Amino acid sequence: MKRFLLPLGIFLVLLVFLGIGLRLKPQEIPSPFVGKAAPAFTLTQLEDAQKSFSPKDMQGQVWLLNVWASWCAPCRLELPALAELKQQASVPIVGLNYTDKRESGNKWLKQYGNPYQLSVFDGDGHVGIDYGVYGVPETFVIDQQGRIRLKFAGPVTPEVIKEVLLPLIEELKRG
Protein backbone atom coordinates (compact mmCIF):
# COMPACT_ATOMS: atom_id res chain seq x y z
CA MET A 1 0.00 0.00 0.00
CA LYS A 2 2.82 2.41 0.89
CA ARG A 3 4.47 1.94 -2.50
CA PHE A 4 1.44 3.59 -4.14
CA LEU A 5 1.54 6.73 -1.96
CA LEU A 6 4.55 8.35 -3.66
CA PRO A 7 3.19 7.96 -7.23
CA LEU A 8 -0.24 9.11 -6.03
CA GLY A 9 1.32 12.18 -4.39
CA ILE A 10 3.27 13.06 -7.53
CA PHE A 11 0.12 12.59 -9.63
CA LEU A 12 -1.88 14.93 -7.35
CA VAL A 13 0.83 17.62 -7.49
CA LEU A 14 0.89 17.42 -11.29
CA LEU A 15 -2.90 17.62 -11.35
CA VAL A 16 -2.80 20.83 -9.28
CA PHE A 17 -0.26 22.40 -11.66
CA LEU A 18 -2.38 21.38 -14.65
CA GLY A 19 -5.42 23.01 -13.07
CA ILE A 20 -3.50 26.24 -12.47
CA GLY A 21 -2.16 26.23 -16.03
CA LEU A 22 -5.61 25.76 -17.53
CA ARG A 23 -6.84 28.90 -15.76
CA LEU A 24 -4.15 31.12 -17.30
CA LYS A 25 -5.05 33.28 -20.29
CA PRO A 26 -2.51 32.76 -23.08
CA GLN A 27 -3.31 36.19 -24.56
CA GLU A 28 -2.01 37.81 -21.41
CA ILE A 29 1.60 36.78 -21.78
CA PRO A 30 3.59 39.15 -19.60
CA SER A 31 5.98 41.26 -21.59
CA PRO A 32 9.03 43.02 -20.16
CA PHE A 33 8.53 45.66 -22.88
CA VAL A 34 5.21 47.04 -21.58
CA GLY A 35 5.85 50.55 -20.30
CA LYS A 36 9.20 50.76 -22.07
CA ALA A 37 10.22 52.33 -25.36
CA ALA A 38 9.32 50.27 -28.40
CA PRO A 39 12.47 48.87 -30.01
CA ALA A 40 13.66 51.04 -32.88
CA PHE A 41 13.92 49.66 -36.38
CA THR A 42 13.85 50.69 -40.00
CA LEU A 43 12.39 48.21 -42.47
CA THR A 44 11.27 48.36 -46.06
CA GLN A 45 7.57 48.44 -46.76
CA LEU A 46 6.08 45.16 -47.89
CA GLU A 47 4.29 46.64 -50.90
CA ASP A 48 7.18 48.85 -52.03
CA ALA A 49 10.75 47.85 -51.14
CA GLN A 50 11.93 51.35 -52.16
CA LYS A 51 10.06 52.90 -49.20
CA SER A 52 10.94 52.38 -45.56
CA PHE A 53 9.22 52.76 -42.20
CA SER A 54 10.42 53.39 -38.68
CA PRO A 55 8.43 53.77 -35.43
CA LYS A 56 9.79 57.33 -35.36
CA ASP A 57 7.36 58.01 -38.23
CA MET A 58 4.48 57.48 -35.77
CA GLN A 59 5.83 59.73 -32.99
CA GLY A 60 3.06 61.81 -31.44
CA GLN A 61 0.22 59.38 -32.17
CA VAL A 62 -1.23 56.22 -30.72
CA TRP A 63 -0.79 53.30 -33.13
CA LEU A 64 -0.85 49.54 -33.34
CA LEU A 65 1.83 47.16 -34.56
CA ASN A 66 0.22 43.90 -35.67
CA VAL A 67 2.59 40.99 -36.31
CA TRP A 68 1.29 38.64 -39.01
CA ALA A 69 2.35 36.17 -41.70
CA SER A 70 0.77 34.66 -44.78
CA TRP A 71 1.29 31.15 -43.38
CA CYS A 72 -0.66 32.03 -40.18
CA ALA A 73 -4.29 30.82 -40.16
CA PRO A 74 -5.35 32.88 -37.09
CA CYS A 75 -3.96 35.99 -38.81
CA ARG A 76 -6.55 35.57 -41.54
CA LEU A 77 -9.32 35.23 -38.94
CA GLU A 78 -8.48 38.59 -37.38
CA LEU A 79 -8.49 40.61 -40.62
CA PRO A 80 -12.17 41.67 -40.44
CA ALA A 81 -11.79 42.73 -36.81
CA LEU A 82 -8.65 44.76 -37.64
CA ALA A 83 -10.47 46.45 -40.53
CA GLU A 84 -13.31 47.36 -38.16
CA LEU A 85 -10.85 48.64 -35.55
CA LYS A 86 -9.19 50.84 -38.12
CA GLN A 87 -12.56 52.49 -38.81
CA GLN A 88 -13.82 52.64 -35.20
CA ALA A 89 -10.71 53.93 -33.50
CA SER A 90 -9.23 55.96 -36.34
CA VAL A 91 -5.90 54.57 -35.22
CA PRO A 92 -3.11 53.66 -37.62
CA ILE A 93 -2.39 49.94 -37.79
CA VAL A 94 1.03 48.98 -39.07
CA GLY A 95 1.53 45.38 -40.08
CA LEU A 96 4.80 43.57 -39.44
CA ASN A 97 5.05 40.74 -41.97
CA TYR A 98 7.07 38.27 -39.90
CA THR A 99 9.37 35.51 -41.25
CA ASP A 100 7.56 35.39 -44.54
CA LYS A 101 8.33 35.88 -48.21
CA ARG A 102 7.58 39.30 -49.67
CA GLU A 103 5.62 37.81 -52.59
CA SER A 104 3.53 35.62 -50.26
CA GLY A 105 2.69 38.54 -47.98
CA ASN A 106 1.60 40.78 -50.85
CA LYS A 107 -0.48 38.01 -52.44
CA TRP A 108 -2.15 37.25 -49.09
CA LEU A 109 -3.14 40.90 -48.51
CA LYS A 110 -4.57 41.16 -52.03
CA GLN A 111 -6.51 37.94 -51.58
CA TYR A 112 -7.94 38.49 -48.07
CA GLY A 113 -7.95 42.28 -47.64
CA ASN A 114 -5.56 44.81 -46.19
CA PRO A 115 -6.52 46.49 -42.89
CA TYR A 116 -3.10 48.12 -42.50
CA GLN A 117 -2.03 51.69 -43.14
CA LEU A 118 1.13 49.96 -44.32
CA SER A 119 3.03 46.75 -43.71
CA VAL A 120 6.75 46.36 -43.25
CA PHE A 121 8.75 43.30 -44.24
CA ASP A 122 10.63 41.41 -41.50
CA GLY A 123 11.72 38.39 -43.54
CA ASP A 124 14.48 37.28 -41.17
CA GLY A 125 12.39 37.92 -38.04
CA HIS A 126 14.93 40.11 -36.25
CA VAL A 127 12.47 42.91 -35.46
CA GLY A 128 9.92 40.41 -34.20
CA ILE A 129 12.57 38.96 -31.91
CA ASP A 130 13.42 42.47 -30.66
CA TYR A 131 9.74 42.89 -29.73
CA GLY A 132 9.64 39.54 -27.94
CA VAL A 133 7.24 37.92 -30.38
CA TYR A 134 6.37 34.36 -29.34
CA GLY A 135 4.17 33.64 -32.35
CA VAL A 136 1.74 35.24 -34.73
CA PRO A 137 -0.53 37.05 -34.56
CA GLU A 138 0.50 39.49 -31.85
CA THR A 139 -0.58 43.10 -31.49
CA PHE A 140 1.19 45.93 -29.69
CA VAL A 141 -0.42 49.23 -28.66
CA ILE A 142 2.18 52.00 -28.78
CA ASP A 143 1.57 55.44 -27.30
CA GLN A 144 2.45 58.94 -28.47
CA GLN A 145 5.88 58.79 -26.81
CA GLY A 146 6.74 55.50 -28.48
CA ARG A 147 6.21 53.30 -25.40
CA ILE A 148 4.58 49.89 -25.63
CA ARG A 149 1.41 50.01 -23.56
CA LEU A 150 -0.01 46.56 -24.34
CA LYS A 151 1.05 43.29 -25.92
CA PHE A 152 -1.83 41.07 -27.00
CA ALA A 153 -1.02 37.54 -28.18
CA GLY A 154 -3.46 35.78 -30.45
CA PRO A 155 -6.04 36.94 -32.96
CA VAL A 156 -7.82 40.23 -32.33
CA THR A 157 -11.58 39.63 -32.09
CA PRO A 158 -14.51 42.06 -31.84
CA GLU A 159 -14.65 41.31 -28.10
CA VAL A 160 -10.96 42.12 -27.65
CA ILE A 161 -11.47 45.37 -29.55
CA LYS A 162 -14.46 46.37 -27.41
CA GLU A 163 -13.13 45.26 -24.03
CA VAL A 164 -9.37 45.78 -24.31
CA LEU A 165 -8.13 47.83 -27.27
CA LEU A 166 -10.71 50.62 -27.63
CA PRO A 167 -10.71 51.59 -23.93
CA LEU A 168 -6.91 51.72 -23.87
CA ILE A 169 -6.67 53.63 -27.17
CA GLU A 170 -9.22 56.21 -25.98
CA GLU A 171 -7.41 56.59 -22.65
CA LEU A 172 -4.09 57.12 -24.40
CA LYS A 173 -5.56 59.63 -26.86
CA ARG A 174 -6.97 61.68 -23.96
CA GLY A 175 -3.47 61.85 -22.57
Image (cartoon, rainbow, N blue to C red):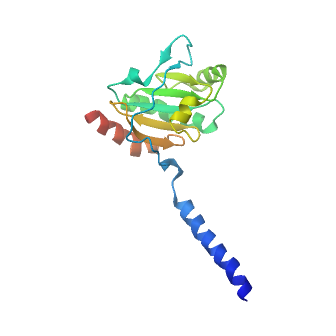
In the displayed structure image, the side of residue 50 where residue 99 appears, left or right: right
Viewer-proximal residue, 20 or 108?
20
Residue at 52% x, 23% y is 119
Look at the picture and state if 11 lies above or below 97: below
Residue at 64% x, 27% y is 100
Picture mark count: 0
Viewer-proximal residue, 46 or 157?
46
Specify the quadrant of the image occupied by residue 70.
top right
Residue at 63% x, 20% y is 102
Can you name the residue that lies furthest to the bottom here? 1
Q: Is residue 79 visible?
A: no
Image spot of residue 163 (x, y percent) = 40, 46
Specify the quadrant of the image occupied by residue 109.
top right
Q: Image quadrant for the N terminus?
A: bottom right
Specify the quadrant of the image occupied by residue 55.
top left
Viewer-proximal residue, 107 or 172?
172
In the displayed structure image, the side of residue 74 where residue 27 appears, left or right: left
Image spot of residue 94 (x, y percent) = 47, 26
Can you name the residue that lies furthest to the top here? 50
Q: Is residue 67 visible?
A: yes
Viewer-proximal residue, 175 or 4?
4
Image spot of residue 25 (x, y percent) = 51, 54
Q: Image quadrant for the C terminus?
A: top left
Look at the picture and state if 8 lies above or below 174: below
Image spot of residue 33 (x, y percent) = 44, 40
Residue at 39% x, 38% y is 36
